Amino acid sequence: MLAVYDGPLAIDPQTDGPLKVRGNLEITAGTARVVARVQSALLCRCGGSANKPFCDGTRLKNGFRG
């Protein structure tokens, strides 16, 4: 469980990589199932991750630029 469910959120797109998100995060699926409760995460932007929504480095294989 997160100690706090609000507060500042920082989103930093990494050059040709994932979104680096920091803050109190509750990540949910479309069905409202909680996927993770974390304080930071690297979220996939290339669409190729086998561990969505998290980045697994697939961008290095598929040549993602963004």
Image (cartoon, rainbow, N blue to C red):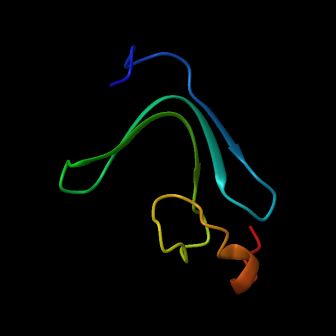
Where does residue 22 sit, x and y in percent of width and height? 60, 32
Residue with the most extreme bottom position: 62
Q: Quadrant of the C terminus?
A: bottom right
41 sits to left or right of 16: left
Residue 3 or 5: which is nearer the viewer?
Answer: 3
Residue at 52 percent across and 58 percent down: it is 54
Q: Position of residue 45 (x, y in %)?
A: 60, 64
Give the side of residue 21 with respect to residue 31, left or right: right
Question: In the displayed image of the protein, which residue is found farthest to the front?
Answer: 1
Horizontal side, residue 63 vs residue 28: left or right: right
Of the 4 image quadrants, the one containing the N terminus is top left
- In the image, is residue 44 above or below residue 3? below
3, 15: nearer the viewer: 3
Q: Residue at x 64, y 76 (%)?
A: 58
Give the x, y percent position of residue 64: 72, 76
Left or right: 1 in relation to 47 = left
- Which residue ends up furthest to the left in the rendered image? 31
Up-down relation of residue 39 to residue 59 (above or below): above
Front residue (pair 12, 41): 41
Question: Which residue is depicted at the point 47% across and 67% down?
Answer: 51
Residue 11: % across, % down: 64, 38
